[in-house]
Amino acid sequence: MKKILVASALAIATLSVSPMLATPAFAQAKGVAVADVRVAAARSTAFTTASQQIETTYKAQIDQQNTRAQTLQAEVNVLIAKYNEEAKKSPQNQTALQAAGKAVQDKRQAAQTELGQIGAPVELAIAYVEDQISVRMNEAIKAAMTAKKVDLLLNPDAVLARENNVDITDAVVTELNRILPNVSIAVPAGYQPGQLVQQRNQQLMDAARAAQPGAAPAPAGSAPTTR
């Protein structure tokens, strides 16, 4: 099974952190550190427990997907061999060669679609786990920054050189474990990937608007509280 930390929801979480980190100017920052949000999420108790639960709960789908993938790959290999045989002929029959190449491409696309359908419930559960972690990641980061007396936190990819002691990823893991010790893998009806993060962002924007002097009341039907 693929690792649960794919880029989708956690990329949104990284973006949602930016307003909190943009406040202090870099030149004025007294404590600077780095932290890898994706690594922190992957090391969290919530993630590791949920990944084990998904592998158990969706074992039938995972096994079916793996078995079917092997069969489909064998079928693709046969078509590739036919294409290679056509390519070796001299002179080449361009019509036959193009048809053989198209057959390989079509088979690969059909295989990806079929495997995606088999694994859809697993992918949705993964997305739901990611989403729940993403929603609470800002809290964990802010708590880790406070604990480590950091007022500017950077992504490791944005740093040219650093000492190991400026990495507070482990501190983020500690705070995430405290704030969110577990998550659910029971996907609610109608759930869409990224939904929890979107709702949380909407709540934050509504709260910011409400805090402004003379702000109009939030319109009815705004996103409900997710946690």
Image (spheres, rainbow, N blue to C red):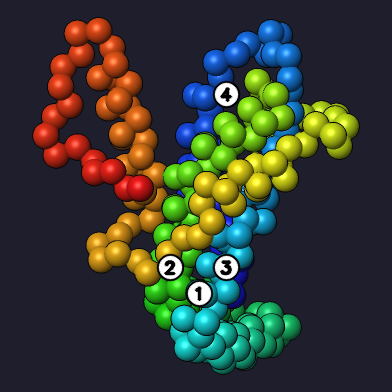
First in sequence: mark 2 or mark 1? 1
Distance Cα–Cα, label 2 vs label 1: 7 Å
Q: At 71% across and 8% down in the image, what residue appears?
A: 27
Q: Is residue 109 above or below residue 88?
A: above
| Residue tagged 2 | 185
Disc 3 marks a residue whose amino acid type is: Thr
227 vs 86, nearest the viewer: 227
Disc 1 marks a residue whose amino acid type is: Ile
Label 2 SS: loop
Q: Quadrant of residue 141?
A: top right
| Residue tagged 3 | 49
Label 1 SS: helix
Q: Residues within 10 Å of mark 3 (few under 14, many from 20)?
A: some
Distance Cα–Cα, label 1 vs label 3: 9 Å
Disc 4 marks a residue whose amino acid type is: Leu
| Residue tagged 1 | 54
- The answer to whether 39 appears left or right of 199 in the picture is right
